[in-house]
Amino acid sequence: MSKRNTIFYSAQKGTVMISRFCLWSVIILMITTNVWSKDVKSSDNTVMPTIKWIAVNPNTDSQKLKVPCRENGKQTSTAIFDIEYNRIMNCSLYYTDGHSVEMDCVGGRIIRIGILTFGRDVNERILVISEDGGTGGNGIDLDVVCPRYETYTGISMWFSANVTAVVPDITTTDNYNDKRLHIERQYLEKLKYEYGFISDDEISKKQNDPAYAWYFWNKDNGKVVHGILKIRKYKGKPEESGSVLDTLVDDNITYKALFKAGVIAYDSKTDEHYVLFHPVWSYSWPTKLVKKGPI
């Protein structure tokens, strides 16, 4: 006699009930939620970058990084970055004619800074790549300081950890679509892929990749309130991308509730794992697994 496994899902009053039916027994799990709970080379000749990277000492408490910039071969300005504990606290452009401009690209931990030019356009820009984040995710800022136009433009990406929405949240500076900055914009649109951006179309090609298990669980089951869940099984043990808050072992299957994530199950007999649950709001992560069977 062969087993027939079905996952049944029911959610009521903030509590999630998940049942696993087979020919011999029924297992019900009660999940209690916490309610608070590079260098880039472009194939496009119009956006072919040349970058001269600048060394920044990450171990210095405080430093001023001075970056001279040229227009048409002549130095016209100097960018001064005030850096504390590898974070940009302030950036100012000082011009040879005596005036200065404050830049607002501050706050993140520096990944890289470099002088950037494009093809025959020898006017120098400054590429600033920085990051920030915590247990909820991480952000990447890609900014280009443009002394010629006394401004900077940039794109920010936020990658939430262990969520069903894999495509990062994108924000841009107000001048991102300024026609004067179209080369910089084209370059940044390419550069973002080198720092983790992925589109829905690209994700759709990764249905067998366990790294996107949360995403496809939500795609398959996100609108289910009461009903049968579609379960995608992946070979091998799951990678635990967060702290394990609770574990429930039932015969050959081990269930784990993860911090700021969902519930994963591992079947030691088949050497397969799968997602059993993920909250719509990641801050309602499961904290307790309770067996309520067999029936």
Image (cartoon, rainbow, N blue to C red):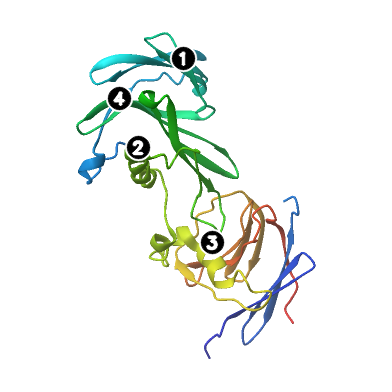
Q: Nearer the viewer, residue 209 or 177?
A: 177
Instruction: Report x, y in % for residue 251.
Output: 61, 71
Inspect the image, locate mark 4, and give the three-letter code of the amino acid beneath it. Glu
Residue sitting at 52 percent across and 62 percent down? 215
Which mark is in front, 2 or 3?
2
Badge 2 or badge 3: first in the primary sequence: 2
| Circle 1 SS class | strand
The alpha-carbon separation of the residues under discs 3 and 4 comes to: 43 Å
| Residue farthest to the bottom, as pictured | 1
The alpha-carbon separation of the residues under discs 1 and 2 comes to: 22 Å
Q: Dot 4, crowdedness within 10 Å: few (<14), some or many (≥20)?
A: many
Inspect the image, locate mark 1, and give the three-letter code of the amino acid beneath it. Ser
Instruction: Report x, y in % for residue 126.
Output: 36, 26
Q: Which residue is mark 2?
A: 184
Q: Are marks 2 and 3 in contact (CB under 8 Å)?
A: no
Q: Is residue 137 above or below residue 98?
A: below
Q: Is residue 267 visible?
A: no
Q: Is residue 28 above or below residue 215?
A: below
Badge 1 or badge 2: first in the primary sequence: 1
Q: Which residue is mark 4?
A: 124
Inspect the image, locate mark 3, and give the three-letter code of the amino acid beneath it. Trp
Instruction: Report x, y in % for residue 274.
Output: 53, 67
Q: Dot 3, crowdedness within 10 Å: few (<14), some or many (≥20)?
A: many
The alpha-carbon separation of the residues under discs 1 and 4 comes to: 17 Å
Q: Which residue is mark 1?
A: 100
Q: Which residue is mark 3?
A: 214
The alpha-carbon separation of the residues under discs 2 and 4 comes to: 11 Å
Badge 3 or badge 1: first in the primary sequence: 1
The alpha-carbon separation of the residues under discs 3 and 1 comes to: 48 Å
